[in-house]
Image (cartoon, coloured by chain):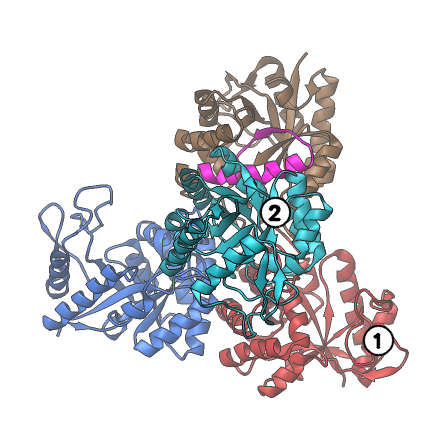
Chain colours: A brown, B cyan, C red, D blue
Amino acid sequence: MYQVDLNADLGESFGSYTIGLDSEVTKHVSSANIACGWHAGDPMVLDATLALAKERGIAVGAHPGYPDLMGFGRRNMACSPDEIKNYVTYQLGAFAAFAKVHGLEIQHVKAHGAMYNTAGKDLKQALAITRAVHDFDPNICLLALAGSKMVDAAAELGMKCASEFFADRGYEEDGSLVARTKEGAMISDENQAIERVIRVVREGKVRAVTGNDIAVRCDSVCVHGDNAHAVAFVKTIRERLTAEGIEVCPFGAFV
Amino acid sequence: MYQVDLNADLGESFGSYTIGLDSEVTKHVSSANIACGWHAGDPMVLDATLALAKERGIAVGAHPGYPDLMGFGRRNMACSPDEIKNYVTYQLGAFAAFAKVHGLEIQHVKAHGAMYNTAGKDLKQALAITRAVHDFDPNICLLALAGSKMVDAAAELGMKCASEFFADRGYEEDGSLVARTKEGAMISDENQAIERVIRVVREGKVRAVTGNDIAVRCDSVCVHGDNAHAVAFVKTIRERLTAEGIEVCPFGAFV
Amino acid sequence: MYQVDLNADLGESFGSYTIGLDSEVTKHVSSANIACGWHAGDPMVLDATLALAKERGIAVGAHPGYPDLMGFGRRNMACSPDEIKNYVTYQLGAFAAFAKVHGLEIQHVKAHGAMYNTAGKDLKQALAITRAVHDFDPNICLLALAGSKMVDAAAELGMKCASEFFADRGYEEDGSLVARTKEGAMISDENQAIERVIRVVREGKVRAVTGNDIAVRCDSVCVHGDNAHAVAFVKTIRERLTAEGIEVCPFGAFV
Amino acid sequence: MYQVDLNADLGESFGSYTIGLDSEVTKHVSSANIACGWHAGDPMVLDATLALAKERGIAVGAHPGYPDLMGFGRRNMACSPDEIKNYVTYQLGAFAAFAKVHGLEIQHVKAHGAMYNTAGKDLKQALAITRAVHDFDPNICLLALAGSKMVDAAAELGMKCASEFFADRGYEEDGSLVARTKEGAMISDENQAIERVIRVVREGKVRAVTGNDIAVRCDSVCVHGDNAHAVAFVKTIRERLTAEGIEVCPFGAFV
């Protein structure tokens, strides 16, 4: 039987500021990447988000980012590998305390935003993140862009790594995402996006922007819970996957 | 044989900013309270400080504070008990990750600055801190002002608590510290300060500002490593205690 | 002819986080208190908010707060008067730069949240804020709770000060607001709230929670733009005031 | 008569953290670049630093940086030109308020650290900084690396710009600094460094790392006040320049 995970970023609210329909999207995803208080999130939000994840029975992971709340962790920062390693250790530890208090296992770590993008292309940054997770707990799984340097880094340190697929993004023939500035970057047709997910799960293939099929691994599909439309899409994709006989479950069950 | 601990605040540097002669004072103290990145400290500093503590063979504890780097955690903030609990969980978790990576046990948690002072007088705040530590790991010891509400809170939740004595501060008859605005607040004579420590360790008594003796428990003496003079005092007090047959060791060994 | 100002807090968004229906509420208020980047707001938001205020033709003021983004400036912080003075100077200067770039005059300064409340009761804090504004530009008007220490501080330094009235709050006989924990703290009936505003503008009187009338000055009514309901109330109160022959205009025109 | 300015970064302390021997170095420099509270500095430090600069009679400028206190503004951040413009407006405004309160004119703006380096090579970033200064006050002078994109940006917007020379850095033939990773990056011999300054002031020439002379403009020499050795060097260079008949004075007097 085919299996796939649906993951979304959660716990991105901060103080009096709210982002994300966490209470809704957690009804449909199987894994949550939870902000750790640097690019988003705070201790009150961490506590509430882990309580919610527990109530919904979904798997949880830490979602560390750059120390840039004003930029929501989306701007690249020229941090050294040593800084990245310690920044991830710090955020993972803070997250782990709340997971422990709520009696939850840590399924994974997924870097956020610019840290995710940089680590996908730069092996040193990828190794810094992976080393931080490894030294904290070698049983935690990484969640990374399929085919990226993070996957290589995980392999190098003997860590498990789940491959992430983007339903709404075009792929180059080399397996990288089509840059947002180029044509074909976004798959705006929702039905087509869902068909691509079903195919990548069953066949491990996706049609690249060039028109040729390429092999892509998909353990988890990245979805969003920012607004009502995004949540409706998550509900739909889950229903379609289930109807197609594909089980939606945390990737920790099969990676 | 008499035993007592000497504790100092460490890891208070931040980014390019340095505070404290950590490398020196760790030669003389037996326990370190390590800042967790909110009122002071950062992930690079945490990493370096735990490596140093391990090298010196001293016991370590988390030293959480208010989210006020600009005020060094010394200004009271009207946080709710729920906020305090989650703030301590967050900082303790971050600290714990570095302790784990360095293979160190967490001996204790000591609140910093204004959080320490408030929790010493306000049972709700004291319980919030104690609850956070308890839920994370009930075997961690608290370190608190002798006779304070933190001691009561630890007892209420069945947690171990070491009592802290201030060598350079005068005491009221009720066991509280003489307010800094009043005469007798500071014991400026170093020899007298050391004599007070020796006596409180041996007899559990100190001469209050009124002239009468009072009972005070002393498991650990708070010392400082901010400047060369302070470090010299720590070296002297340790030598004097040792010469008097009092063993200086982490309080985790005897509390 | 009677005149009154309607003021609302604006520019409270931060980075990717949005608070407030600024674009809507600015259609109805006459003055905006604009966050300065400490408890809320950031440079991008300041720029956009001043552009919006200019487009709407409303008067603007700086809205400085404590350095506590996580608590939205609503938690008291034990800052010294010297700290408060310099914090206000800093925020007022940052605000003033954007006002200058957009060609707008600074009508006023209103402290935010816990800083507003503290300064309303503590003359030293009130003088610290007033002194900061005075030394920057003695022609800027203060906006403060009617009858509060801020009004006294402004008088002491020879500064103009507009008195603020809360439409939805009950008043004690001494002119202070009924504490939120007590009965009569909130005026939930919107029609009654509007009637109180009309009366206080015309007669300078309001019925206190005791049932007796008291004298209260009202140059400006504090309204909110957080949600659609709040904005609808602002629209209604403006229409009612206008229908009653009371002109809604920036208080700078008549204070 | 030859004239040159000596400039140093000041006001980099933060809260309880001290950096720089400001009280000493201000005896020898003619201009101060004062941190604005983002990468370093805070309102208390700004106030004290401007009071000190006034007492010493030296010229002052704003020294804005990236929002990265932990990295002291030395790490590149991928901010957009719009963000840079507003970040500079914000910091310049905050600085300007303290300058106004102390009755000081703003001589200049010099970007800090990574912002300085990026703007030196990237015309868009350089224009963003220059535009912010221009829109705030077109009479403020920029201080920038000789021959850099900041000089071009200032010319493009019709702003004055002083050219900065580094006494202790090697130069490539194109006028850029030798990268720190390459041989010849640093001029460690202090006498040689001073001779280079004297020559560049008199002849507008410096010997490049290749051995050939190149033309370099020098309105101001960047010096440091971080430690006693650095301050001693500043004292020496000032004495040598004076002995050579070169007047040390704020560049605002001759640019």
Secondary structure beneath dot 2 equals strand
Residue A150: x percent and y percent? 47, 27
Q: Amino acid at mark 1?
A: Arg
Whether C131 is drawn above or below D145: the answer is below
Q: Amino acid at mark 2?
A: Leu
Whether C163 is drawn above or below A102: the answer is below
Residue B33: x percent and y percent? 51, 48
Q: Nearer the viewer, residue A250 or C57?
A: A250
Chain label for disc 2: B
Left or right: where D2 falls relative to A82: left
Classify mark 1: residues with Cα within 10 Å, few (<14), some (14-19) or many (20+). many
Chain label for disc 1: C
Residue B142: image tag = 2
Magenta span main SS: helix
Q: Is residue A72 visible?
A: no
Residue C196: image tag = 1
Whether D139 is drawn above or below A176: the answer is below
Q: Which residues are magenta?
A: A85-114
